[in-house]
């Protein structure tokens, strides 16, 4: 991925995360589920990101990487 793509991925993820959780832009260590995320909200976040990024974002990425930093790092390096 290019630096521009990585930056766009991070920006889209932060905006979607904040919108789904009705909160502020997340910090690297913010945990989706501790911040009020549920399995339904996780599905909504991944569906929104799939649409924004133009590629499938499986919910398992968020379930296995529930902090914002880990989730975005996985998104940036994943082809899924």
Image (cartoon, rainbow, N blue to C red):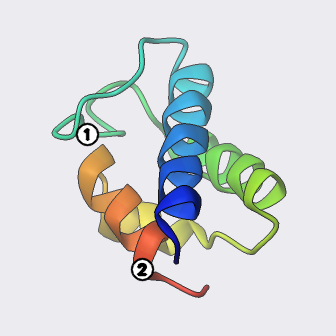
Between marks 1 and 2, how big is the CA–CA gap?
A: 20 Å
Category of crowding for the residue at label 1, using alpha-carbon neighbours closer than 10 angstroms: few (below 14), some (14–19), many (at least 20): some
Category of crowding for the residue at label 2, using alpha-carbon neighbours closer than 10 angstroms: few (below 14), some (14–19), many (at least 20): few
**Is label 2 in a helix, a strand or a loop?**
helix
Task: Give the percent coordinates (x, y) of residue 25.
Answer: 41, 21
Q: Is residue 67 visible in the rendered structure shown here? A: no
Which quarter of the rendered picture does the C terminus lie within?
Answer: bottom right
**Is label 1 in a helix, a strand or a loop?**
loop
Q: Work out which residue is located at the far left of the displayed protein and give it.
A: 29
Q: Quadrant of residue 79?
A: bottom right
Q: Which mark is residue 31?
A: 1
Question: Nearer the N terminus, badge 1 or badge 2?
Answer: 1
Left or right: residue 57 compared with residue 60 = right
Residue under the image location 64 percent in, 69 percent down: 57
Seen in the picture, residue 24 relative to 39 is either above or below; the reply is above
Closer to us: 65 or 73: 73
Q: Which mark is residue 77?
A: 2
Closer to us: 9 or 23: 9
The label nearer to you, 1 versus 2, is: 2
Residue under the image location 36 percent in, 39 percent down: 32
Seen in the picture, residue 42 relative to 62 is either above or below; the reply is above
Q: Quadrant of residue 77?
A: bottom left
């Amino acid at each position: 991925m290019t630096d521009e793509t990585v930056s766009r991925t991070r920006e889209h993820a932060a905006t979607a995360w904040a919108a789904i959780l009705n909160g502020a832009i997340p910090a690297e260590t913010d945990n989706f589920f501790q911040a009020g995320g549920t399995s339904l909200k996780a599905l909504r976040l991944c569906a929104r990101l799939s649409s924004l990024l133009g590629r499938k974002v499986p919910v398992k990425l968020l379930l296995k990487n529930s902090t914002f930093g880990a989730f975005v790092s996985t998104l940036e390096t994943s082809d899924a």
